[in-house]
Image: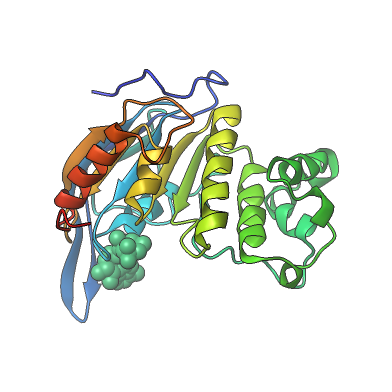
């Protein structure tokens, strides 16, 4: 049951509904089949922010790639707004841990990539300026990636995603490489953007605290092959506070589920 109390309804219809039904997937590895996802079922409401946690190598990125349409599932159903996901679509955008900017392109031209690829740049170029403004990088529009800090480069990657006005923003550890101060600032930015834009968000993170600060719901996966071990609804509005006893108690519970002792 999805708790919709804090689900984002800033822009009705902006976020898409995601349905994952009995999804199983694996890879062949040196002649053997490596099962990676095992009967995963998950429904995400439009505008919901869901965080995925689980051991390294359990299958989180694989799940995101399937949702993005970058790969086809062995078994089960995957639907966005009731339509089968069979290929990538501009409505579903992924931001990876590594910002992967083109070094020879200025910041503005990196953000413009999606619109350019769709042949929309001439008529909708102003959206690039807007996306850069949203992540606070307007003054760096003419800079090259090598002239940016790590956090700024990650914000460019976020702007590059936002320019496509995604209805589902898929985030694969997008803040993983940032220092803790930049990370805290970016977490706030992610919440602000999500509240203003109304998209549905699916975030993979290794940081339990980050999941608790950002998400409406946290899904905890088992070791590979990943199955859903637990689902926790985070019954708090925003902004949230790291030292909120309710969040601290959930953190303890999740660390326990991940097999980390209570000494943390
Ligand atoms: N293209 C591929 N071919 C073969 N095996 C793959 C492929 N992609 C992923 N795998 C395997 O699938 C498993 C899950 O990988 P995945 O990247 O989804 O894990 P993850 O949960 O995202 O891990 P991490 O938290 O370390 O990023 C791993 O054992 C990996 O080796
Ligand atoms: Mg991964």
Q: Determine the image quadrant of residue 74.
A: bottom left
Judge by depth and name the residue closer to the eye, 6 or 37.
Answer: 6
Ligand 1 is found in the corner quadrant, namely bottom left
What residue do we see at 54% from left, 18% from top? Answer: 12
**Residue 48 placement (x, y as % from top left):** 41, 30
Q: Is residue 67 visible?
A: no
Judge by depth and name the residue closer to the eye, 193 or 121.
Answer: 193
Colour scheme? rainbow
Which quadrant, please, contains the N terminus?
Answer: top left
What residue do we see at 56% from left, 49% from top? Answer: 186
How many numbered discs, if any?
0
What residue do we see at 53% from left, 62% from top? Answer: 178
**Residue 193 placement (x, y as % from top left):** 59, 36
**Residue 55 placement (x, y as % from top left):** 24, 60
**Residue 198 placement (x, y as % from top left):** 54, 28
Furthest residue in direction bottom, as rendered? 30
In the displayed structure, 256 sits above or below 127; it is: below
| Image-based side of 126 in relation to 146, left or right | right
Which quadrant, please, contains the C terminus?
Answer: bottom left
| Image-based side of 34 in relation to 128, left or right | left
What residue do we see at 50% from left, 56% from top? Answer: 175
Q: Is residue 137 visible?
A: yes
């Amino acid at each position: 049951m999805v708790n919709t109390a804090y689900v984002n309804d800033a822009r009705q219809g902006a976020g898409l509904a995601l349905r994952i039904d009995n999804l199983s997937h694996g890879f062949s590895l040196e002649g053997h089949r490596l099962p990676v996802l095992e009967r995963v079922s998950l429904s995400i409401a439009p505008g919901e922010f869901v965080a995925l946690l689980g051991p390294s190598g359990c299958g989180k990125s694989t799940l995101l790639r399937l949702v993005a349409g970058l790969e086809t599932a062995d078994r089960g159903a995957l639907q966005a707004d009731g339509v089968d996901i069979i290929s990538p679509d501009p409505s579903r955008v992924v931001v990876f841990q590594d910002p992967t900017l083109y070094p020879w392109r200025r910041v503005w031209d990196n953000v413009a990539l999606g619109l350019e690829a769709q042949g929309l740049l001439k008529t909708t170029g102003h959206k690039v300026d807007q996306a850069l403004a949203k992540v606070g990088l307007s003054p760096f529009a003419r800079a090259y990636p090598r002239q940016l800090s790590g956090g700024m480069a990650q914000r460019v990657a976020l702007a590059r995603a936002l320019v496509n006005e995604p209805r589902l923003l898929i985030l694969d550890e997008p803040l993983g490489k940032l220092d803790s101060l930049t990370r805290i600032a970016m977490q706030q930015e992610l919440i602000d953007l999500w509240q203003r834009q109304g998209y549905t968000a699916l975030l993979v993170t290794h940081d339990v605290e980050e999941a608790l600060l950002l998400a409406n719901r946290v899904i905890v996966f088992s070791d590979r092959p990943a199955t859903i071990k637990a689902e926790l609804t985070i019954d708090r509005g925003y902004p949230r506070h790291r030292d909120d006893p309710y969040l601290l108690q959930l953190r303890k519970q999740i660390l326990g589920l991940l097999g980390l002792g209570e000494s943390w």
